[in-house]
Image (cartoon, helix red, strand yellow):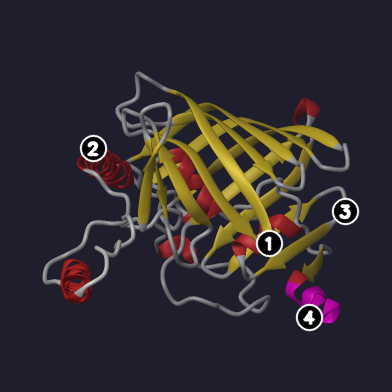
Amino acid sequence: MSPVRPFGPGAPARLAVPLLLLALAAALWGCGPKAPRGDSPPAEALWAAFDTARHAARRATTGFSAAGSLNYAGADGKAMRVEFLFWGNPDGGESATVQRPELRPVLRPELRPVLRLDTSAGFGTPVALWREDARGIEGYYPGEGTLYAHADPRAGAARMGLGVPLALGDLAALVCGGYDGLVPARYQSVAPTPEGGFRYEFSGALPVSSLTLDATGRPVVLAGRLRQTAWTLELGTFDEAAALPEPRRLALRTESGSTAIIRIKRLERRDAPWPADRLALAVPEDTRIVPLELYETLDQ
């Protein structure tokens, strides 16, 4: 909105400015809901299409399983490629009971997803096995004989070297198209993109600060920040045969220079949740357990 300009000298100008300010205040603070800054009917319609699709994805995903590959390249030049199996119950459930309740306290009383992620190198050699539930995230490294744990799933995944600044629940939301815990119900502002879509900006504590929808309402770019590190995630190679917008390629880049390319080769949704025994993370009795929060406290 352009600033109010004076009309010139004289009494009429002195009266016109206060009247214009009153009119501006009435427009800003009048009764009724206000459209987000920069909003327009096409932007609102595109957001409504996205919102409808993610609600449908949430209803269609009681449980899921996915398989694919992860190519990671760090800012230090180190790279790795692993195959993964990813499965669980995005909405949580009775199977949220953990095996080691003495390991760490519950930080949040609400229900969280119960998820498993296994990664392996060539010939099926296990690299790391993860589990996320209401109490946080665990990562078991068979080569070290060590189980790492953290009550904050996002911070824990980053410290355990998952390769993406997101928790398993965030990845499940992306893979299954529900976006729970990532994208809020409403946006703060919106701007058009050169490709014909819109970029929606958010405020608050969620990890995603902006979401870009293409001209059909599919999410194509997310951006956010984790512990002062900005990142962007490009979604693509959508399965056109699927009833819901399922990205089969996720390309993540951080401002520090690391990249992670996730390719989804298979995705299946289940009508019933996975039973608890299929989501357990069994480790040998002599496994060393390392609560990462303790090391963060010592570092401070």
On-image quarter of the C terminus: bottom right
* Residue 61 position by quadrant: top left
Q: Which residues are magenta?
A: 293-300
Secondary structure of the residue carrying numbered label 1: loop
> In front: mark 1 or mark 2?
2
C-alpha gap between disc 4 and disc 1: 19 Å
Q: Pointer 4: what residue?
A: 297
Q: Residues within 10 Å of mark 4 (few under 14, many from 20)?
A: few
Give how far apart the Cα atoms at labels 3 and 4 are.
Answer: 23 Å
How far apart marks 1 and 2 lie (CA) works out to 33 Å
**What residue appears at the point 34 percent right and 24 percent down from the top-left corner?**
242
Position of 133 with respect to 19 (left or right) is right
What is the distance, in whole Å, between disc 2 and disc 4 at their CAs? Answer: 49 Å
Report the Cα–Cα distance between label 3 and label 2.
Answer: 53 Å
- The residue sitting at 57% across, 70% down in the picture is 135
**Label 2 crowding class (10 Å Cα cut-off): few <14, some 14-19, many 20+?**
few
| Label located before the other in sequence (4 or 1) | 1
Image quadrant occupied by the N terminus: bottom left
Residue, disc 3 = 144
Residue type at mark 2? Pro
Frontmost residue, 157 versus 34: 34
Looking at the picture, how far across and down is residue 217, in whole percent?
32, 34
